[in-house]
Image: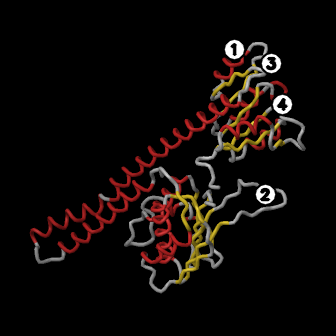
């Protein structure tokens, strides 16, 4: 079974979560009911304030739902306290109108405190449908707002890239054409032609950058090995050799995954050594941490000189290159493709001392 589209991980804090072992209760009736209502949901229930605070501080959840009677009757206080100093997840307060002396006052106080939504329920009335809808709406609204912010940032960077990176070669071409009028036998036309070619390369990369950063409409099951081998056949690899260590299938937009891998392979061949390895990022399970929140994905590694630690954050910036012939957009496009899928990308050191580019947060396709 393939993972549900856009899964939603919910932290549910409730004073009457049950009598499970420890402070975390894996499957309460409310949690099971919510998961049945919407197959995107994974609900983790806690009944202890410290446990809730610890989990809330992680990056695993998309939404926090707290009962008004949680944490010694101060569920609202927990929601407000936990949001200070960090970006707020959607926060929903569930108010049992039969258990609170003045439900309207609680609702007003919660909304004034910036809680995302308040869900009023009555004893004996099934609330899972209403709560599931409100959770889904809150998470989808936040994701839409986050995506809109990301697209605005992309547009700003795109405009900046166009104005900055195209200006220099166009100025060169314009200047040399002016000089060629007085000296038609000189080298000015050749230099101008080279500058125009450079401009066309930059335009091609900028258009690719604009397209690849858009969020994919549909994800498909894509074979990593087949895609890598297809990329290897289309990238200029010279005498380099390829080793593919994974038969994993991932959920991705096929053409954009191919663009990402082509850029990483091309970068490995251009700046690395003689060997390129593609493999799976395997979570490091331990006796105390064996949950599904650990990063999975794939990597492209080489045995070249590697990337200095001081430069590892900069390599994904627009225009960053150590090659005078490069446009500096190859790895930036990799970052945009990854971000559009909701993946993370970073560079570290490979086993051979070269560069290892890891793409994580990738969903496997069964």
Tell me the SS state at disc 3: loop
- Horizontal side, residue 18 vs residue 167: left or right: right
State the mark number for residue 91.
none
**Which of the two residues, 82 or 211, is positioned nearer the viewer here?**
211
Seen at 76% across and 54% down, the residue is 291
- For marks 3 and 1 on the same chain, the one whose residue lies earlier in the sequence: 3
Instruction: List the single residue furthest toward the bottom.
Output: 239
Question: In 3D space, how far apart are the residues under numbered discs 1 and 2 (Cα atoms)?
Answer: 43 Å
Question: In 3D space, how far apart are the residues under numbered discs 3 and 1 (Cα atoms)?
Answer: 12 Å
Question: In 3D space, how far apart are the residues under numbered discs 4 and 2 (Cα atoms)?
Answer: 26 Å
Residue 171 % position (x, y): 24, 61
Q: Tell me the residue that label 2 is attached to.
A: 290
Residue 296, quarter of the rendered image: bottom right
Q: Tell me the residue that label 3 is attached to.
A: 99
- For marks 2 and 3 on the same chain, the one whose residue lies earlier in the sequence: 3
Image quarter (top left, top right, bottom left or bottom right) of the C terminus: bottom right
Question: In 3D space, how far apart are the residues under numbered discs 2 and 3 (Cα atoms)?
Answer: 38 Å
Mark 4, other Cα within 10 Å: few <14 / some 14–19 / many ≥20:
some
Seen at 18% across and 76% down, the residue is 187
Q: Is residue 289 above or below residue 74?
A: below
Does the residue at mark 4 contact the one at mark 2 (Cβ under 8 Å)?
no
Mark 1, other Cα within 10 Å: few <14 / some 14–19 / many ≥20:
few
- Horizontal side, residue 37 vs residue 290: left or right: left
Tell me the SS state at disc 4: loop
Q: Is residue 13 above or below residue 364?
A: above
Q: Tell me the residue that label 4 is attached to.
A: 15
Does the residue at mark 3 contact the one at mark 4 (Cβ under 8 Å)?
no
Q: Tell me the residue that label 1 is attached to.
A: 104
């Amino acid at each position: 079974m393939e993972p549900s589209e856009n899964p939603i991980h919910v932290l549910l804090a409730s004073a009457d979560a049950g009598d499970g072992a420890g402070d975390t209760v894996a499957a309460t009736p409310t949690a099971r009911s919510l998961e049945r209502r919407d197959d995107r949901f994974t609900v983790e229930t806690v009944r202890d304030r410290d446990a809730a605070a610890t989990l809330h501080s992680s990056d695993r959840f998309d939404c926090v739902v707290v009962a008004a009677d949680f944490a010694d009757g101060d569920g609202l206080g927990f929601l407000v306290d936990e949001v200070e100093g960090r970006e707020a997840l959607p926060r929903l307060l569930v108010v049992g109108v039969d258990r609170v002396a003045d439900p309207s006052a609680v609702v007003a106080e919660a909304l004034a405190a910036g809680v995302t939504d308040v869900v009023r329920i009555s004893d004996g009335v099934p609330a899972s449908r209403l709560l599931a809808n409100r959770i889904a709406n809150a998470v989808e609204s936040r994701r839409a707002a986050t995506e809109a912010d990301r697209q605005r940032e992309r547009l700003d960077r795109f405009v900046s890239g166009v104005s900055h990176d195209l200006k220099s070669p166009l100025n060169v071409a314009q200047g040399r054409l002016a000089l060629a009028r007085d000296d038609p036998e000189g080298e000015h036309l050749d230099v101008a032609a080279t500058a125009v070619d450079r401009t066309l390369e930059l335009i091609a990369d900028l258009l690719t950058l604009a397209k690849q950063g858009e969020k994919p409409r549909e994800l498909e099951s894509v074979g990593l090995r087949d895609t890598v081998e297809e990329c290897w056949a289309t990238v200029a690899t010279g005498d380099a050799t390829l080793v593919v260590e994974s038969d994993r299938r991932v959920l991705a937009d096929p053409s954009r995954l191919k663009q990402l891998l082509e850029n990483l392979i091309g970068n490995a061949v251009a700046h690395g050594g003689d060997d390129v390895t593609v493999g799976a990022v395997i979570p490091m399970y331990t006796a105390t941490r064996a949950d599904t929140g650990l990063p999975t994905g794939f990597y492209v590694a080489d045995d070249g000189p590697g990337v200095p630690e001081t430069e590892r954050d900069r390599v994904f910036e627009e225009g960053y290159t150590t090659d005078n012939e490069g446009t500096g957009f190859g790895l930036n496009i990799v970052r945009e493709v990854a971000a559009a899928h909701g993946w993370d990308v970073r560079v570290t050191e490979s086993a051979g001392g070269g560069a290892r580019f890891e793409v994580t947060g990738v969903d496997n396709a069964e």
